[in-house]
Image: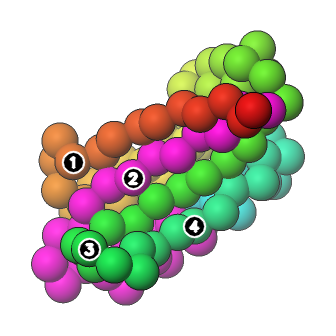
């Protein structure tokens, strides 16, 4: 099993809009790609962060879905529309394999 987590920092005063976007993009991914994503917020540390987590059966599945998403104009419309919520350059992706 592959676990993918994307974390980004939220601009001051944009937490509400960032959470709304996070839920919107998660719903889109569920509807368009049958991808279950969780929206996460930190319990400790910097509170101005938000993350998404998804699980895939294997790397090939992750690559297939990611390739489709990156070619999807609706995906980019949603992502680009939320750019005012997040600090540029703060996004970090991690990929974990369950053992």
Q: Which residue is mark 1?
A: 90
Task: Pick whichever of labels 3 and 2 is earlier in the sequence.
Answer: 2
Task: Pick whichever of labels 4 and 1 is earlier in the sequence.
Answer: 4
Which residue is farthest front?
Answer: 99
Mark 3 Cα-neighbour bin, 10 Å: few <14, some 14–19, many ≥20: few
Residue at the image point whose x is 79% and y is 41% from the top: 33
Q: Position of residue 60 (x, y in %)?
A: 76, 14
Q: Quadrant of residue 52?
A: bottom right
Disc 2, disc 1: CB below 8 Å? no
Mark 2 Cα-neighbour bin, 10 Å: few <14, some 14–19, many ≥20: some
Q: Which residue is mark 4?
A: 39
Give me the disc on residue 45: 3
Residue at the image point whose x is 45% and y is 74% from the top: 41
Confirm whether the magenta stretch covers residue 13: yes
Disc 3, disc 2: CB below 8 Å? no
Q: Residue 87 vs residue 33: left or right? A: left
Task: Pick whichever of labels 3 and 1 is earlier in the sequence.
Answer: 3
Q: Secondary structure at mark 1?
A: loop
Mark 3 → mark 4, Cα distance in angstroms: 17 Å
Mark 2 → mark 4, Cα distance in angstroms: 10 Å
Q: Secondary structure at mark 4?
A: strand
Q: Which residue is mark 2?
A: 7
Magenta region: 1-24
In depth, the one of 12 and 45 nearer the eye is: 45
Q: Position of residue 94 (x, y in %)?
A: 46, 36
Q: Position of residue 73 (x, y in %)?
A: 55, 34
């Amino acid at each position: 099993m592959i676990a993918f987590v994307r974390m980004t920092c939220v601009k001051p005063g944009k937490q509400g809009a960032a959470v709304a976007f996070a839920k919107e993009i998660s719903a889109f991914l569920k509807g368009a790609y049958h991808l279950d994503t969780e929206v996460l917020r930190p319990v400790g540390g910097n509170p101005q962060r938000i993350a998404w987590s998804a699980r895939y059966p294997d790397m090939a599945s992750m690559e297939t879905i990611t390739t489709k998403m990156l070619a999807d104009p609706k995906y980019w419309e949603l992502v680009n529309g939320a750019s005012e919520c997040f600090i540029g350059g703060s996004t970090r992706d991690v990929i974990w394999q369950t053992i």
